[in-house]
Amino acid sequence: MKNSLRKISRGTGLSAAVLGVSALVLSGCGAPPAEDSSGGGASAEAGTDYLGCIVSDSGGFDDRSFNQSSYEGLKKAETDLGIQINQAESQAETDFGPNVDQMVQAGCNLTVTVGFLLADTTKAAAEANVDSNFAIVDDNSIDLPNVKPIIYDTAQAAFLAGYAAAATSETGKVATFGGVNIPTVTIFMDGFAEGVTYFNEETGGDVQLLGWDKESQNGTFVGNFEDAAAGKTNTQNFINEGADIIMPVAGPVGSGTLDAVIEANAGGKDVKAIWVDSDGYETAGKGEEFILTSVMKLMGDAVEDVISTDVEGNFDNAPYVGTLENGGVALAPFHDQEANVPADLQATLDGLKEQIIAGDISVESAASPK
């Protein structure tokens, strides 16, 4: 019998994190403004004239999150498959159209567009260029034979993060906020909220969630994925309200959260962050010792896999859905925070993961892939 999850109704109010590509072979459902570069790889297939390309969203390829991970997948394909590559880095949404057009004009065999916000641009380009293939991360709205959707049920892994946050909070308050109120952001926040709720139901706890009301789908958003200063201010506000674990779902804005957490701990508090998209301990570049865990989309491998499939002549448009079961989403290790985690928590999280995979626990979000 499935457990019933009570909806949480607290809080104040995308990650571009959310906008990533996943791992595993992409199979049917079940990865400087506009600057170019290309170069050959060094594999047994060296010398191929196949051109694989990528267009970032406005977070850029150094966002320490989904754009960067996706780009690393393209670079790995360059090395492993010996393909040529080209990329265009968007600084703003107005760059999307010119950047995708630039890739088409360059003769790209396949162009990966990173993020929900590029859906309209990707669809228009695919319709106008039926002999070119495209893959889009975090969007499943395009039904065309030459477009491969790569999407994730991120709520599943975020549920585990919410449970872990509630189980380790000393103040009884945790928080989350987003970059922009779009499905690829709110799916993290929904899963996180359900994990907190489940902890309270199972243990008799009363951990409060600030920043997101799952029932009303309202919460705290910066309004973009670039304003790290706003991310810092929001995090400081949550800390002042008593939250000791904060999960930003906002791409580069999350660096502001880490700044606030670092300062709070230097001032004598005990505050932690939860990263999204990639393993923040490996990618964030600062404050790693204060990152409890990360809600990961395993993106780089998927970019390489979809390119490899296309190189082999086996491209298809069946959506890939990353889940806990197929390894497309995952909870990162606790790293430096492991000593602060109750001894039995990891075993509990492992059990919850298996229950979600088995369908015994249903994690629900309006933004989950259908």
Image: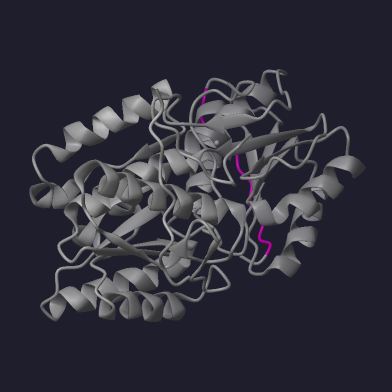
Could you tell me residue 253's position as x and y percent? 45, 69
| Foreground of the two, 86 or 217 | 217
Could you tell me residue 12's position as x and y percent? 44, 72
Could you tell me residue 86's position as x and y percent? 66, 47
Quadrant of residue 94 in the image?
Answer: bottom right
Q: Is residue 329 positioned above or below 275 on the image? A: above
Residue 78 appears left or right of 195: right
Which residue: 70% across, 18% down? 314
Q: Main secondary structure of the magenta part?
A: loop
Whether residue 140 can be seen here: yes
Which residue: 44% across, 61% down? 9
Q: Which colour scheme is used?
A: one colour
Which residue: 21% across, 48% down? 204
Is 245 colored magenta in this rendering?
Answer: no
Which residue: 63% across, 59% down? 57
Whether residue 82 can be seen here: no
Q: Where the N terminus falls, by quadrant? A: top left
Quadrant of residue 206 in the image?
Answer: bottom left
Q: Is residue 22 positioned above or below 254 on the image? A: above
Q: Where the C terminus falls, by quadrant? A: top right
Number of marks in the rendered image: 0
| Foreground of the two, 319 or 26 | 319
Outermost residue to the right? 128
Q: What stretch is highlighted in magenta?
A: 34-43
Residue 164 appears left or right of 4: left
| Foreground of the two, 57 or 275 | 275
Could you tell me residue 202's position as x and y percent? 25, 41
